[in-house]
Amino acid sequence: MMSLSRIRGMAICTALVLPTIPLTALAQNLSANEVRGTSLSGQWQSGQGVVTRGPDGKVVFLFGEVQPSVVCSPLQVCDIELQAGEIVRDVLLGDTVRWKVEPATSGAPGGQAVHLIVKPAESGLVTSMVVTTSRRTYHIQLKSHHSQYMARVGFEYPEDVNARFAEINARIEASIVPGAGVPADQLDFGYRMTGGARWKPTRIYSDGLKTYIQFPGSLSGQDAPVLFVVSGGENRIVNYRMNGTMMVVDYHIDHAILVSGVGRDQQKITIRRGG
């Protein structure tokens, strides 16, 4: 029977014979680009980003800003809602054993939204999920907590935000009156006309510096009347130009006369501001 002292001696000799492997040899070296790449990826993964509250308690992330982190809980479900009309191609999980993802849909046919119902098996888990769709790719971090979880999660998309700004700009541009280049509520339409002519203006307005006289679409450049501004009891010619059927007058008119033809064929429209 081997004595205890002999066993101890053999253990000591074995320890002296086995080579010592330094920790640095066990670690995998990274190049400078690999270190920088993992650092940049880490910044994106751990970035705070913009998180807001949407309708019905939805937690809304701005897509693409950072990697969203969705917190789930055992015995609960996390509902991750994608954009309406978006078709899911693949759902890839880092941990397919302790995390389950099931699909669901909502909305009318033709504009349905896909929901990813996420369920963890236990708390204290961290994994990643990649979802590829017909429009984009989602990179999502999943965490499980023993009691806290996000019941509903959705996304705000930069292109949707840009589209809303474009719509607002379009509405603003639609309110711009031709010629003046400013919104209608900044113009003075307080002009009245007397007289009759086949080319009688359809509207007259001023931006405080210039006056804009809009003629019917049937008016041709050769038939445009001549404008005289009445000042001090005299008819004076001021600078103006025709832009299609729009007469742009480099003057804020108070009293003017439009005249075409001579003799019995003469046609005249008198313009006055106010009154």
Image (cartoon, helix red, strand yellow):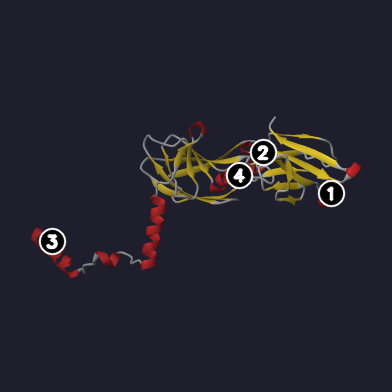
Q: CA distance from mark 4 to mark 1?
A: 36 Å
Name the residue beneath numbered marker 2.
Answer: 109
Total numbered circles: 4
Q: Hey, what amino acid is under mark 4?
A: Asn
Point 41% across, 51% down: residue: 45
Mark 3, mark 1: which one is toward the viewer? 1
Q: Quadrant of the C terminus?
A: top right
Question: 225 and 187: which one is in front?
Answer: 225
Q: Which residue is mark 3?
A: 7
Image spot of residue 67 (x, y percent): 44, 49
Relative image position of residue 203 (x, y in whole percent): 74, 38
Q: Nearer the viewer, residue 246 or 99?
A: 246
Q: Residues within 10 Å of mark 3 (few under 14, many from 20)?
A: few
Q: Identify the mark at residue 169; answer none if there is no mark.
A: 4
Q: CA distance from mark 4 to mark 3?
A: 87 Å
**CB contact under 8 Å: marks 2 and 1:** no
- Considering only order in the chain, which callout, 1 or 2, is on the residue closer to the N terminus? 2
Q: Quadrant of the N terminus?
A: bottom left
| Residue 193 seen in the current view | yes
Q: Disc number at residue 223?
A: 1
Q: Amino acid at mark 1?
A: Asp
The residue at 36%/36% (across/down) is 146
Separation of marks 3 and 1 at Cα, in angstroms: 122 Å
Structural distance between the alpha carbons of marks 4 and 2 = 31 Å
- Front tag of 4 and 3: 4
Q: Image check: 29 left or right of 99?
A: left
Which residue is at a point 68% across and 41% down the rendered structure image?
253
Q: Mark 2: few, some, or many residues within 10 Å (few <14, many ≥20)?
A: few
Task: Indicate which label's residue lies in the foreground, 4 or 1.
Answer: 1
